[in-house]
Image (cartoon, rainbow, N blue to C red):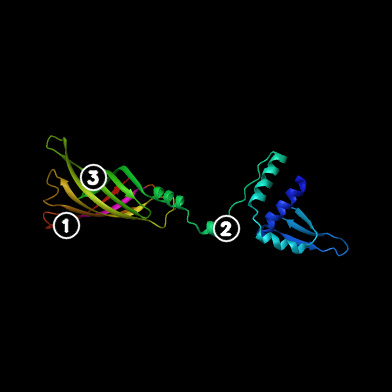
Amino acid sequence: MNNRHFISAGIFMLFFYCPAALAQTQIRHNTQAKQDSVVIELPNNIKLLLITDDVTKLQQLEKMSLDSVVRDLNRQVQEATGKTPATPPDTTNKEKNKPDLRYDVSYKRKNDQLALTLGAGAGLIRSQLVPKLSPTIALKRKRMEYSITYDMNYFFERQENRQYKLYLNTFLDFGIGTKLFNRPNDVDVYQKLTIGYLIHSKGDYFGKNTFKLSYSYPITNKSIRLMPELYITNNFKSIFPGISINF
């Protein structure tokens, strides 16, 4: 058998065991001749022809291993054409059902982020406008955010000499937030509930053991946040509200 016939037979046997790739198979039995033929019609207008003296002998192919035939066929095709045969994709059920572990790892790395940000804004506390600086470190997960904020509040008081004196009051805030579902998937904005404690006090703006409860809600996708606040001070004897806008 020359190379041409060998290649034709190898291709036939390869596709004979892969019925999903076949478009149509025709068996032509010639009673007047000593040879029968099998025509295999493949996609892309490709036809394969097998000539045999008895088509019933095809049953013997079920016991044969085609691995060596396919390897020899690929080698001869490469030598004849100078091109490496394309490797067909593995479409077995085993591969379809196999979990993609690399996707899981990438997914976790994409959604678990440790972020350090410096926020700024202003609050209204006891009818006084108070500028704020709020460096925050946050762990952002798929739908949750956990944060620690060093919330610095700058109170300015005018003295008798018409000069202003600065009183810095600082809260340490602990927050937990959930990602909003009504925003685009690529926009990480969270609504957050925060509890804070006054760790540095100056002036008479707050009493002893001051706590702050706040709710942060993003009003734009650019993280402009509206924050209603509730201050509990003087050993839980005094309560008053506040409100802030942070950027």
Front one among 200 and 81:
81
Q: Residue at x 12, y 34 (%)?
A: 161
Front one among 25 and 138:
25
**How far, Cα to Cα, is label 1 from label 2?**
68 Å
Q: Residue 92, labelled with which disc? A: 2
**How far, Cα to Cα, is label 1 from label 3?**
22 Å
SS of the residue under disc 1: strand
Asked if the residues shown at circle 2 and circle 3 are in contact, with their CB atoms under 8 angstroms apart, the answer is no
Label 1 crowd (10 A; few <14 / some 14-19 / many >=20): few
Asked if the residues shown at circle 1 and circle 2 are in contact, with their CB atoms under 8 angstroms apart, the answer is no
Q: Residue 150, labelled with which disc? A: 3
Percent x, y for residue 168? 18, 41
**Residue type beneath disc 1:** Ile
Q: Which stretch is magenta?
A: 223-230
Dominant SS in magenta: strand
Q: Residue at x 30, y 51 (%)?
A: 146
Q: Against 79, is 53 above or below?
A: below
Q: Is residue 16 left or right of residue 190?
A: right
